[in-house]
Image (cartoon, rainbow, N blue to C red):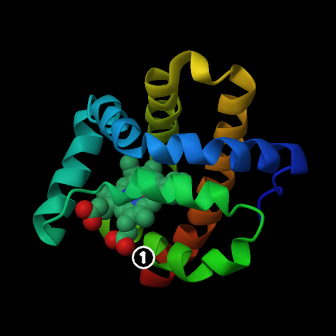
Amino acid sequence: MSKPLSPETIAIIKSTAPALRQHGLAITTRMYERLFVDPEIKAMFDEAAQKSGEQPKRLAEAILAFAENADRLGALTPAIERMAARHVETGVRPEHYPAVANALLPAIKDVLGDAIDDGVLDAWGEAYWFLADVLKAREATLYTQAA
Ligand code: HEM
């Protein structure tokens, strides 16, 4: 299990979550612009979208929603289970997680600019990696079971 988020980080995230949600679509759009610069990652989403017929906007929305609930992860177990299953279907591996972090966090800064400072971005970075660790652990188990 990953190291729990500190009370300070949780407080920052909860106080800034409404601003991030308000600009959610802009942040998501900017995140995918940044993420899809990598053709290998873009291809994963293209193939998934062909099967599901939907834009994968849920990814960034989920990161926002989940960071807001980072202090009560138990409530998120069913959603984490769905995400991990979808990730295993689409071949997401631990080495892909930095690319999403490197797209999401600068996208937040691109959109919100001077409205947020480095402390806020650091808190969201911690929340991202907290979730990423939970997902990676569950996905490792699913990959082992499938092998
Ligand atoms: C903390 C990090 C992440 C979170 C919270 C997250 C969340 C999600 C969610 C909520 C979905 C939709 C699940 C469903 O169909 O019900 C999803 C799907 C997906 N995710 Fe992630 N994800 C994360 C990291 C990643 C990474 C690192 C990659 C790889 C680059 C990735 C690639 C995908 C793909 C390809 C899909 C399928 C999209 C589709 O069905 O069209 N995700 N993710």
Q: How many marks?
A: 1
- Inspect this view and state whether residue 14 appears: yes
Q: Residue at x 21, y 62 (%)?
A: 48
Q: Residue at x 52, y 69 (%)?
A: 139
Q: Name the residue under label 1.
A: 85
Q: Residue at x 58, y 72 (%)?
A: 138
Q: Which of 42 and 55 is in front in this view?
A: 55
Q: Quadrant of residue 99?
A: top left
Q: Which of 14 and 85 is in front in this view?
A: 14
**Picture coordinates of residue 31, whole percent (x, y):** 37, 36
- Inspect this view and state whether residue 97 appears: no
Query: Is 71 left, or right, of 64 in this rendering?
Result: right
Query: Is 30 left, or right, of 45 in this rendering?
Result: right
What is the crowding at mark 1: few (fewer than 14 residues within 10 Å), some, or many (at least 20)? Answer: some
Query: Is 32 left, or right, of 117 in this rendering?
Result: left
**Picture coordinates of residue 87, whole percent (x, y):** 40, 65
Amino acid of disc 1: Ala
Instruction: Report if the beta carbon of the residue with label 1 is closer than 8 angstroms to ligand 1.
Output: no
Task: Farthest residue to the right: give it.
Answer: 7
Q: Residue at x 61, y 47 (%)?
A: 17
What secondary structure is found at the residue carrying circle 1? helix
Q: Nearer the viewer, residue 29 or 82?
A: 29
138 in relation to 20, above or below: below
Q: Quadrant of residue 38?
A: top left
**Picture coordinates of residue 121, whole percent (x, y):** 65, 30
